[in-house]
Image (cartoon, grey):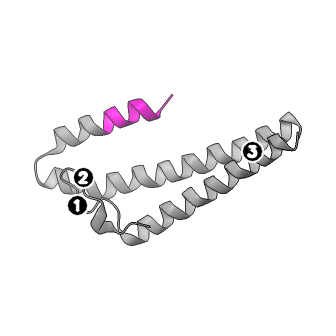
Amino acid sequence: MPTNNDNYHGGCSPVHSNESLKRIYNRLFRIEGYIREVKTMVAENHTCPEILVQLAVVRDTINQVSRLILDEHFNECIARVAHNSNLDKEIRELKSALDKFLP
């Protein structure tokens, strides 16, 4: 797992604290486990409803980690960038990322 010293972006440094990285990585590892379970369920020919329930768990966990990252961005990066008068650029970058992320 990288440390916060490996993660610099724009006006925000570091992007994630070590505690935050640990929370994010734990959730990503959980997602990997759920995906492996879905693959196993498909290989073992489980029913569609069973697989769809597991996929819903994957989607919910992805949403949780996404909210964690977005919340951290607002709390840390936006506050720092606003203080440094670089808010317009940060808002444009955030809007671009949200456009790609949201359906």
Looking at the picture, how far across and down is residue 78, in whole percent? 25, 51
CA gap, disc 1 and disc 2? 6 Å
Q: Which residue is mark 2?
A: 9
Which amino acid does the dot numbered 1 rest on?
Answer: Ser
Q: Residue furthest bottom?
A: 19
* Closer to viewer: mark 3 or mark 1: 3
In x, y percent, where is residue 33? 67, 56
- The verdict on residue 99 being magenta is yes
Residue drawn 85% across the image and 36% down it: 49
Q: Amino acid at mark 3?
A: Lys
Instruction: Looking at this view, name the residue that lies furthest to the front.
Output: 43
The numbered dot on residue 13 is 1
Q: Which mark is residue 39?
A: 3
Q: Is there CB contact under 8 Å for labels 1 and 2?
A: yes
Relative side of 50 to 59, left or right? right
Say which amino acid is labelled 2.
Answer: His
Q: Relative to 9, say whether 100 is above or below.
A: above
As helix, strand or loop, the secondary structure at mark 2 comes to loop
Q: SS for tag 3?
A: helix
Residue drawn 32% across and 57% down?
A: 75
Per the image, label 1 sits on a secondary structure element best described as: loop
The quarter of the displayed image where residue 17 is located? bottom left
Q: CA distance from mark 3 to mark 1?
A: 38 Å
The N terminus sits in image quarter: bottom left
Give the mark nearest the N terminus, 2 or 3: 2
